[in-house]
Amino acid sequence: MNISDQIKKSLNFIKFKGIDGVVSTVRYKMSGPGLSYNGWYKETHEPDEEALTVQRETEFAYAPKISILVSVYMTPEFFLRAMIESVQKQTYSNWELCIVDGSQAPDESRQEEEQTLSVYEHVYSLETEKTIRQYADEDPRIHYELLDKNRGICDNTNRALAMATGDFVALLDHDDILTEDALFQVVSALQDEKIDVIYSDEDKMSEDGTKFSDPALKTDFNLDLLRSYPYIANFLVVRTSLARQIGGFRREFDAVRDYDFMLRCLEALASDCGLSSALLRDKIHHIPRVLYHTRMHNRTNEAYARKRECSHNAGKKALAAHLERLDCYATVAYTDMKGVYHVTYETPGNPLLSIIVTACADVALLEKCIMPLFERTRYSNFEIIVVDGMVLQEKAAAYHKLESKRRNLKVVFCRESDNQNRWRNFAAAQAKGEYLLFLNGDIEIADSASISEMIGCCMRKEIGIVGGSVFSANGVMVHSGLVIRADGSVIDAYRGMRKGGFGYLMHNRMNCDYAAVSEECLMIKKDLFNSLGGFSIDANALAASVDLGLRTWEKQMIVMCAANAVWCKHTKNNETVYKVKPENNLVTKYSFYNPNFADNKAPFSL
């Protein structure tokens, strides 16, 4: 890449991410799984020869055949050989490699006058065939078909799917590679025979295959994240019968083959158990290991930009079609991030919302935070209940004045205790709404759509709790979603991130499911709140939030954060430390934090 191209690339990067995004990216590269990743992967994550030997000698009670589907098109010989040999090196041996080759076939995407291959392309396509046949002749597990017509990656992959004789199929791109233990890890997970879909962590590999970077250390199955961008991405392993049941791959989604395919797999599985992530996790399994290396290429800016734009548009179309098939009242919009979408759920019937505000010491601040709820929000069907304990006479007078300003605002007093969890439960018992929104008295609505965003999500039958994105007055994130580390410590995932910044994998700017959300900005179905018995009065605020979140998951309902529901907190919030017992099964199942991240460092650090 010459200097001019490098300058253009840098300017486009700044334009795409903005100054805050550039600063966030630099911070991420200097900490987190950034510069240290290559060494960490090779020293601590990549299996050594001793581990690989043990894997080769392992005999599984259930040993399914895995059919790996690959569509090739004039793949450079070095990349092609690396891909095939990465499959041959697998420590688990019951596999087949189904390769379909469109290199010599007329390309339906070309104009008629362009159908004839150039001399260069003809030689290249013959070399591709020669290389694959060499491997197929020597290894009976490799099956090869030279296509008579190149119909695009989806139809070509469907041909590979038709060739498959395995119990499961796995997707592999023609220039990427699998780690040696990839299939072993998959089959280890499949000893639980309820699983129908598996995905893993992944990273990027230098063009020569010697260095690794930019790991995607993923969360366990996360419905709202999947509806924000195709985070599952590469090395998708699916039960063959399921892949065929949904009709394989659709050619109109060539640019987002894996995404559309995964969304339709999800729908088929949801028809049996509903959309609750809690139930789907029995069927969709995440392996927290890097099992797939995506090869990076030196592309021209123009070609790469065209490909991203095509994928961006096709992804939106696939997501909208998914929501329509499920009869969701929702719209999909682009965001300022390529490949990332914002789903807005409608609020049919506009049900009554009870906003329960826990009083703060400063009544003037309380009024400053409450009045914008009447003046700014687009959602109008609500009542406000301010709850306090014993109060001085002058404070009571201020409350009376506040009540007189609005008919749908009242102040109640929980005189039994100074326990704010008890206050919240007391106020909830008097609420008339179908949905409850708990707010601290120092939190102000910062976007007119915030309540609509939250109640639209909360009205979905699979959702139990919705949190908002809470920032300080100077634009630093205070609350989004709570995750639980392997040692049981609870952290606010993106606390300290500047508004507009890019956290790890940009999840701070997307709707996402979490273990829990903060009680300072929390919406819940009233029926669910009552069935759970409200907030625990024997725990501090953070512990009660986590307890409520985990009990919601236990009820097979989702806890999520609506990234575009933005709020502002006006007082300093001291970060509290809380640990749950790691041996708790709910904690293990709903931590929403990849175990490859460290417990004793900043979030998302190796």
Image (cartoon, rainbow, N blue to C red):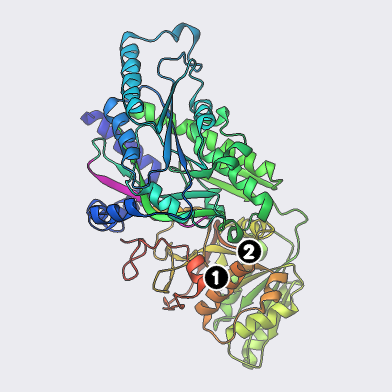
Q: Does residue 175 appear to the left or right of 411 in the view shown?
A: left
Measured in 3D between alpha carbons, the distance from the residue under mark 2 to the one under mark 1, in whole angstroms, is: 26 Å
**Of 423 and 46, which appears nearest the observer?**
46
**Can you give x and y, in whole percent of width and height, for residue 239 in the image?**
54, 44
**Element under disc 2:** loop
Residue drawn at (35%, 69%) of the image: 599
> Residue 557 has which mark?
2
Residue type for callout 1: Ile
Q: Quadrant of the N terminus?
A: top left
**Residue 6 against residue 487 in the figure, above or below:** above
| Residue 531 appears in the rendering | yes
**Element under disc 1:** strand
The local crowd at label 1, few if under 14, some if 14 to 19, many if 20 or more residues have their Cα within 10 Å, is many
**Can you give x and y, in whole percent of width and height, for residue 59 in the image?**
40, 54
Residue stretch in magenta: 210-221
**Residue 192 against residue 405 in the figure, above or below:** above
- Magenta segment includes 220: yes
**Can you give x and y, in whole percent of width and height, for residue 427 in the image?**
69, 80
State which tag comes first along the sequence, 2 or 1. 1
> Residue 152 has which mark?
none
Residue type for callout 2: Met
Q: Name the image quarter holding residue 234.
A: top left
Q: Name the image quarter holding residue 171.
A: top left
- Residue denoted by label 1: 443
